Image: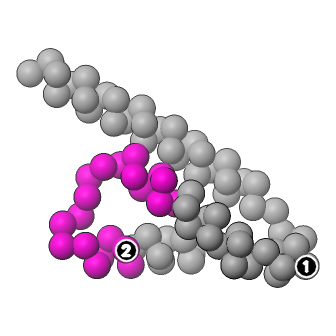
């Protein structure tokens, strides 16, 4: 999890403008997890580590960001 947060922070800090598309954060987390799993597959299996809770947390985060984005869009339409 620390590596995921470090990578996300690195990507954000290298941006000239911090993006506010919150849905994209969830996608980035998911992409990073897939990359991490591929890169460390043997070690994860050797240590019998399950990333199921992390995968579920990322899915929930993505779901919540989509709901948040929809809420923001609906508020913007009311103006």
Residue occupying the point 62% across, 50% down: 57
Residue 76: image location, x then y, percent: 16, 27
Residue 56: image location, x then y, percent: 67, 48
Q: Label 2 belongs to which residue?
A: 11
Element type where label 1 sits in the image:
helix
Residue occupying the point 15% across, 18% down: 78
Residue 31: image location, x then y, percent: 55, 61
Q: Label 1 belongs to which residue?
A: 46
Q: Which residues are magenta?
A: 10-29
User: Does the magenta run of residues contain 14?
Assistant: yes
Task: Out of 30 and 61, give the one closest to the viewer.
Answer: 30
Q: Point out the image quarter for the N terminus.
A: bottom right
Residue occupying the point 76% across, 54% down: 52
Is residue 34 left or right of 23 when viewed as pictured? right
Task: Give the mark, 1 or 2, whose residue is nearer the N terminus.
Answer: 2
Residue occupying the point 57% across, 75% down: 2
**In the image, residue 67 above or below residue 56:** above
Render colour scheme: one colour
Question: Which quadrant of the figure has residue 67?
Answer: top left
């Amino acid at each position: 999890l620390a590596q995921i947060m470090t990578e996300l922070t690195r990507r954000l800090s290298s941006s000239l403008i911090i993006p506010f598309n919150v849905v994209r954060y969830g996608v980035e987390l998911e992409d990073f997890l897939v990359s991490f799993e591929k890169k460390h597959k043997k070690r994860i299996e050797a240590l019998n580590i399950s990333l199921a809770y992390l995968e579920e947390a990322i899915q929930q985060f993505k779901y919540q960001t989509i709901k948040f984005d929809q809420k923001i869009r609906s508020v913007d339409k009311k103006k």
